Image: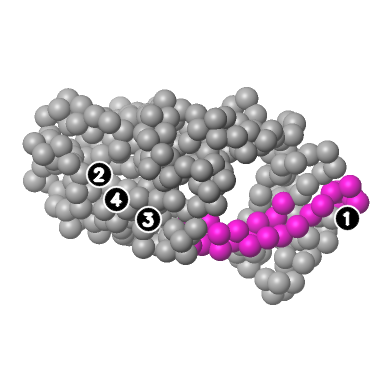
Amino acid sequence: MTYQEFKQRILETLQRELGASAAVTIQDVLKNNDTHLDGLTVFLEGCNASPTVYLDYYYRQYQNGKAFREIMQDILTIYRDNIPESNIDISFFTSYDKVKTQIVFKLINYDRNRELLRNIPHFRFLDLALAFNCLIKTTHTDLATILIQNRHLSFWNITKHDLYSLAMENTPKLLQYDLRNMADVLKELFCADSLPEDFSANLPCPMYVLSNQVKLNGSICILYQNLLHDFAERLGSDLYILPSSVHEVLIIPSDKSHSYEELSDMVREVNATQLAKEEILSDHVYYYSRERDTLTM
Protein backbone atom coordinates (compact mmCIF):
# COMPACT_ATOMS: atom_id res chain seq x y z
CA MET A 1 0.00 0.00 0.00
CA THR A 2 1.42 3.40 -0.97
CA TYR A 3 1.37 6.28 1.47
CA GLN A 4 -1.43 8.01 -0.47
CA GLU A 5 -3.50 4.80 -0.40
CA PHE A 6 -2.75 4.40 3.32
CA LYS A 7 -3.99 7.93 4.10
CA GLN A 8 -7.16 7.45 2.07
CA ARG A 9 -7.93 4.14 3.76
CA ILE A 10 -7.39 5.68 7.20
CA LEU A 11 -9.72 8.53 6.27
CA GLU A 12 -12.48 6.27 4.97
CA THR A 13 -12.23 3.75 7.81
CA LEU A 14 -12.34 6.43 10.49
CA GLN A 15 -15.26 8.17 8.82
CA ARG A 16 -17.26 4.91 8.80
CA GLU A 17 -16.36 4.24 12.43
CA LEU A 18 -17.41 7.68 13.70
CA GLY A 19 -20.41 8.27 11.45
CA ALA A 20 -21.81 11.21 9.53
CA SER A 21 -21.72 13.56 12.53
CA ALA A 22 -17.89 13.58 12.39
CA ALA A 23 -15.85 15.65 9.94
CA VAL A 24 -12.60 13.77 9.31
CA THR A 25 -9.86 15.63 7.44
CA ILE A 26 -6.15 15.33 6.69
CA GLN A 27 -4.16 18.54 6.32
CA ASP A 28 -0.54 19.42 5.65
CA VAL A 29 0.87 20.85 8.89
CA LEU A 30 4.11 22.84 8.99
CA LYS A 31 5.91 21.86 12.18
CA ASN A 32 9.20 22.87 13.75
CA ASN A 33 12.33 22.66 11.57
CA ASP A 34 10.26 23.15 8.40
CA THR A 35 8.88 19.64 8.80
CA HIS A 36 5.67 18.96 6.87
CA LEU A 37 3.43 16.30 8.43
CA ASP A 38 -0.01 14.97 7.53
CA GLY A 39 -2.30 15.82 10.44
CA LEU A 40 -5.54 13.89 10.89
CA THR A 41 -8.29 15.79 12.75
CA VAL A 42 -11.84 14.86 13.70
CA PHE A 43 -14.44 17.51 14.49
CA LEU A 44 -17.72 16.41 16.01
CA GLU A 45 -20.90 18.46 15.94
CA GLY A 46 -20.86 21.03 18.73
CA CYS A 47 -17.10 20.77 19.37
CA ASN A 48 -14.61 23.28 17.98
CA ALA A 49 -11.39 21.44 18.87
CA SER A 50 -9.78 18.14 18.05
CA PRO A 51 -6.52 16.32 18.79
CA THR A 52 -4.24 16.02 15.77
CA VAL A 53 -2.82 12.61 14.88
CA TYR A 54 0.19 12.63 12.55
CA LEU A 55 -0.05 9.82 10.00
CA ASP A 56 3.57 9.83 8.83
CA TYR A 57 4.55 7.98 12.01
CA TYR A 58 1.85 5.34 11.55
CA TYR A 59 2.78 4.68 7.95
CA ARG A 60 6.32 3.90 9.09
CA GLN A 61 4.82 1.43 11.56
CA TYR A 62 2.78 -0.11 8.74
CA GLN A 63 5.91 -0.44 6.61
CA ASN A 64 7.61 -2.18 9.54
CA GLY A 65 4.90 -4.82 9.65
CA LYS A 66 2.25 -3.53 12.04
CA ALA A 67 -1.25 -4.60 10.99
CA PHE A 68 -3.55 -1.89 9.62
CA ARG A 69 -6.34 -2.79 12.07
CA GLU A 70 -3.94 -2.32 15.00
CA ILE A 71 -2.92 1.08 13.66
CA MET A 72 -6.58 2.08 13.36
CA GLN A 73 -7.21 0.99 16.94
CA ASP A 74 -4.24 3.06 18.14
CA ILE A 75 -5.52 6.14 16.30
CA LEU A 76 -9.03 5.72 17.70
CA THR A 77 -7.65 5.28 21.21
CA ILE A 78 -5.50 8.42 20.95
CA TYR A 79 -8.44 10.38 19.57
CA ARG A 80 -10.90 9.24 22.25
CA ASP A 81 -8.40 9.75 25.08
CA ASN A 82 -7.69 13.32 23.99
CA ILE A 83 -11.08 14.73 23.02
CA PRO A 84 -11.41 18.13 24.76
CA GLU A 85 -13.82 18.08 27.68
CA SER A 86 -15.69 21.02 26.16
CA ASN A 87 -15.39 23.69 23.50
CA ILE A 88 -12.20 25.71 23.76
CA ASP A 89 -12.98 29.41 24.05
CA ILE A 90 -10.58 31.10 21.64
CA SER A 91 -12.62 34.29 21.34
CA PHE A 92 -10.14 35.89 23.73
CA PHE A 93 -7.58 35.63 20.92
CA THR A 94 -9.24 38.56 19.17
CA SER A 95 -8.69 40.76 22.22
CA TYR A 96 -5.15 41.95 22.80
CA ASP A 97 -5.97 42.91 26.39
CA LYS A 98 -6.94 39.31 27.10
CA VAL A 99 -4.23 37.58 25.11
CA LYS A 100 -1.27 39.65 26.29
CA THR A 101 -1.06 37.82 29.62
CA GLN A 102 -0.60 34.48 27.79
CA ILE A 103 2.24 35.39 25.38
CA VAL A 104 5.39 33.31 25.96
CA PHE A 105 8.70 32.57 24.24
CA LYS A 106 9.79 29.42 22.47
CA LEU A 107 13.23 28.60 21.05
CA ILE A 108 13.65 27.09 17.59
CA ASN A 109 16.57 26.60 15.23
CA TYR A 110 17.11 29.51 12.86
CA ASP A 111 18.48 27.80 9.75
CA ARG A 112 16.13 24.82 10.00
CA ASN A 113 13.05 27.09 10.09
CA ARG A 114 13.59 29.45 7.17
CA GLU A 115 10.14 28.76 5.73
CA LEU A 116 8.35 29.19 9.05
CA LEU A 117 10.26 32.33 10.06
CA ARG A 118 9.00 34.22 7.01
CA ASN A 119 5.54 34.27 8.58
CA ILE A 120 6.16 34.74 12.29
CA PRO A 121 7.64 37.53 14.44
CA HIS A 122 10.99 36.47 15.86
CA PHE A 123 14.41 37.57 17.11
CA ARG A 124 17.75 35.96 16.22
CA PHE A 125 19.81 34.52 19.08
CA LEU A 126 23.04 32.69 18.26
CA ASP A 127 21.98 29.92 15.84
CA LEU A 128 18.44 30.02 17.24
CA ALA A 129 15.32 32.14 16.91
CA LEU A 130 13.07 33.42 19.66
CA ALA A 131 9.47 32.92 18.55
CA PHE A 132 6.20 33.51 20.39
CA ASN A 133 3.30 31.29 21.48
CA CYS A 134 -0.01 32.03 23.09
CA LEU A 135 -0.88 29.53 25.82
CA ILE A 136 -4.39 28.15 26.07
CA LYS A 137 -5.82 25.59 28.48
CA THR A 138 -7.59 22.60 26.93
CA THR A 139 -8.38 20.89 30.26
CA HIS A 140 -7.65 21.56 33.91
CA THR A 141 -4.18 20.09 33.49
CA ASP A 142 -3.31 20.28 29.78
CA LEU A 143 -1.92 23.20 27.80
CA ALA A 144 -1.98 23.89 24.09
CA THR A 145 -0.27 26.65 22.16
CA ILE A 146 -1.07 28.95 19.25
CA LEU A 147 1.96 30.16 17.31
CA ILE A 148 1.90 33.95 16.91
CA GLN A 149 1.93 34.98 13.23
CA ASN A 150 2.88 38.29 11.62
CA ARG A 151 -0.77 38.89 10.78
CA HIS A 152 -1.65 38.85 14.49
CA LEU A 153 0.59 41.88 15.07
CA SER A 154 -1.38 43.87 12.50
CA PHE A 155 -4.66 42.76 14.02
CA TRP A 156 -3.57 43.75 17.53
CA ASN A 157 -1.73 46.87 16.31
CA ILE A 158 1.49 46.02 18.16
CA THR A 159 5.13 45.31 17.25
CA LYS A 160 7.33 42.30 17.84
CA HIS A 161 9.15 44.36 20.47
CA ASP A 162 5.88 44.60 22.39
CA LEU A 163 5.63 40.80 22.20
CA TYR A 164 9.19 40.51 23.49
CA SER A 165 8.41 42.63 26.56
CA LEU A 166 5.31 40.57 27.30
CA ALA A 167 7.08 37.25 26.89
CA MET A 168 9.99 38.33 29.10
CA GLU A 169 7.51 38.90 31.92
CA ASN A 170 5.08 36.05 31.26
CA THR A 171 7.26 33.06 30.36
CA PRO A 172 9.04 32.50 33.70
CA LYS A 173 5.74 32.92 35.55
CA LEU A 174 3.53 30.75 33.36
CA LEU A 175 6.18 28.12 32.54
CA GLN A 176 8.26 27.87 35.69
CA TYR A 177 11.60 26.15 35.32
CA ASP A 178 12.48 22.68 36.53
CA LEU A 179 16.19 21.97 37.13
CA ARG A 180 17.18 18.56 38.42
CA ASN A 181 20.17 16.29 38.74
CA MET A 182 20.23 13.67 35.98
CA ALA A 183 20.56 10.95 38.62
CA ASP A 184 17.21 11.99 40.14
CA VAL A 185 15.58 12.04 36.69
CA LEU A 186 16.84 8.51 35.97
CA LYS A 187 15.57 7.29 39.34
CA GLU A 188 12.14 8.64 38.47
CA LEU A 189 12.15 7.15 34.98
CA PHE A 190 13.43 3.69 35.85
CA CYS A 191 12.25 3.31 39.46
CA ALA A 192 14.95 3.76 42.09
CA ASP A 193 14.59 0.19 43.38
CA SER A 194 15.64 -1.23 39.99
CA LEU A 195 18.91 0.73 39.90
CA PRO A 196 22.14 -0.27 41.66
CA GLU A 197 22.94 1.71 44.81
CA ASP A 198 26.12 3.19 43.34
CA PHE A 199 24.72 4.08 39.91
CA SER A 200 24.95 7.84 40.61
CA ALA A 201 28.67 7.54 41.31
CA ASN A 202 29.15 5.72 38.01
CA LEU A 203 27.69 8.48 35.86
CA PRO A 204 30.45 9.86 33.60
CA CYS A 205 30.09 13.41 34.97
CA PRO A 206 27.70 15.61 36.94
CA MET A 207 24.78 16.37 34.64
CA TYR A 208 21.59 18.34 35.12
CA VAL A 209 18.32 18.50 33.18
CA LEU A 210 16.69 21.90 32.64
CA SER A 211 13.15 22.29 31.33
CA ASN A 212 9.90 23.85 32.48
CA GLN A 213 7.39 22.12 34.70
CA VAL A 214 5.09 21.12 31.83
CA LYS A 215 8.00 19.87 29.67
CA LEU A 216 6.77 21.94 26.72
CA ASN A 217 9.36 24.00 24.80
CA GLY A 218 11.43 23.99 27.96
CA SER A 219 14.72 24.86 26.25
CA ILE A 220 13.70 28.52 26.59
CA CYS A 221 14.60 28.30 30.29
CA ILE A 222 18.26 28.96 29.42
CA LEU A 223 17.22 32.59 28.89
CA TYR A 224 15.39 33.05 32.20
CA GLN A 225 16.94 35.97 34.03
CA ASN A 226 19.78 34.96 36.36
CA LEU A 227 18.98 31.23 36.14
CA LEU A 228 22.28 30.16 34.56
CA HIS A 229 24.20 32.77 36.53
CA ASP A 230 22.88 31.59 39.89
CA PHE A 231 23.33 27.92 39.03
CA ALA A 232 26.90 28.45 37.83
CA GLU A 233 27.71 30.34 41.03
CA ARG A 234 26.23 27.52 43.07
CA LEU A 235 28.40 24.97 41.28
CA GLY A 236 31.44 27.27 41.18
CA SER A 237 31.92 26.51 37.49
CA ASP A 238 31.20 27.71 33.97
CA LEU A 239 28.63 25.59 32.16
CA TYR A 240 28.25 23.59 28.99
CA ILE A 241 24.66 23.66 27.68
CA LEU A 242 23.72 20.66 25.51
CA PRO A 243 20.51 21.18 23.49
CA SER A 244 18.94 17.74 23.87
CA SER A 245 15.65 18.88 22.24
CA VAL A 246 13.35 21.88 21.93
CA HIS A 247 11.83 20.75 25.23
CA GLU A 248 14.91 20.52 27.44
CA VAL A 249 18.65 21.03 27.70
CA LEU A 250 21.39 19.26 29.61
CA ILE A 251 23.87 21.20 31.73
CA ILE A 252 27.38 19.98 32.50
CA PRO A 253 29.89 21.88 34.68
CA SER A 254 32.87 22.95 32.60
CA ASP A 255 36.07 21.05 33.36
CA LYS A 256 38.92 19.43 31.47
CA SER A 257 37.30 15.99 31.33
CA HIS A 258 35.14 16.96 28.33
CA SER A 259 36.01 19.04 25.30
CA TYR A 260 33.61 21.19 23.34
CA GLU A 261 34.23 19.02 20.28
CA GLU A 262 33.40 15.79 22.12
CA LEU A 263 30.17 17.22 23.48
CA SER A 264 29.17 18.63 20.09
CA ASP A 265 29.76 15.23 18.48
CA MET A 266 27.51 13.68 21.11
CA VAL A 267 24.71 16.20 20.45
CA ARG A 268 24.91 15.65 16.69
CA GLU A 269 24.77 11.89 17.10
CA VAL A 270 21.71 12.07 19.36
CA ASN A 271 19.99 14.45 16.93
CA ALA A 272 20.70 12.14 14.01
CA THR A 273 19.72 8.87 15.66
CA GLN A 274 17.38 9.51 18.61
CA LEU A 275 15.21 12.55 17.87
CA ALA A 276 12.38 13.19 15.45
CA LYS A 277 13.31 15.97 13.04
CA GLU A 278 10.82 18.41 14.56
CA GLU A 279 12.27 17.90 18.07
CA ILE A 280 15.81 19.04 17.21
CA LEU A 281 16.93 22.38 18.64
CA SER A 282 20.57 22.65 17.55
CA ASP A 283 23.69 20.69 16.65
CA HIS A 284 25.83 23.10 18.66
CA VAL A 285 26.83 23.10 22.31
CA TYR A 286 26.61 26.43 24.16
CA TYR A 287 28.97 27.79 26.79
CA TYR A 288 27.98 29.93 29.76
CA SER A 289 30.75 32.08 31.25
CA ARG A 290 30.34 33.19 34.86
CA GLU A 291 32.88 35.98 34.48
CA ARG A 292 31.18 37.54 31.47
CA ASP A 293 27.63 36.35 32.26
CA THR A 294 27.19 35.41 28.61
CA LEU A 295 25.97 32.43 26.62
CA THR A 296 28.00 31.73 23.47
CA MET A 297 28.61 29.00 20.93
SS at circle 1 = helix
Dot 3 surroundings within 10 Å: few (below 14), some, or many (20 or more)? Answer: many
Dividing the picture into quadrants, the one containing residue 62 is bottom right
SS at circle 2 = strand
- The type of residue carrying mark 2 is Ile
SS at circle 4 = strand
- Depth check, front residue: 69 or 46: 46
Tag 4 and tag 3, C-beta contact below 8 Å: no
Asked if residue 38 lies in the magenta stretch, the reply is: yes
Q: Nearer the viewer, mark 4 or mark 3?
A: 4
Tag 2 and tag 1, C-beta contact below 8 Å: no
Locate the N terminus by quadrant: bottom right
What residue do we see at 17% from left, 41% from top? 294
Tag 3 and tag 2, C-beta contact below 8 Å: no
User: Which residue in the structure is indicated by mark 3?
Assistant: 109
Q: Nearer the viewer, mark 3 or mark 2?
A: 3
Q: N-terminal of the two: label 3 or label 2?
A: 3
Asked if residue 268 lies in the magenta stretch, the reply is: no
| Secondary structure mostly taken by the magenta-highlighted segment of the chain | strand
- Depth check, front residue: 144 or 65: 144
- The type of residue carrying mark 4 is Phe
Q: Disc 3 to disc 2, how far (Cα)?
A: 15 Å
Q: In this view of the protein, can residue 238 be seen by the observer?
A: no
Residue 241 is tagged as: 2
Q: N-terminal of the two: label 2 or label 4?
A: 4
Region in magenta: 16-41
The answer to whether 268 appears left or right of 113 in the picture is left
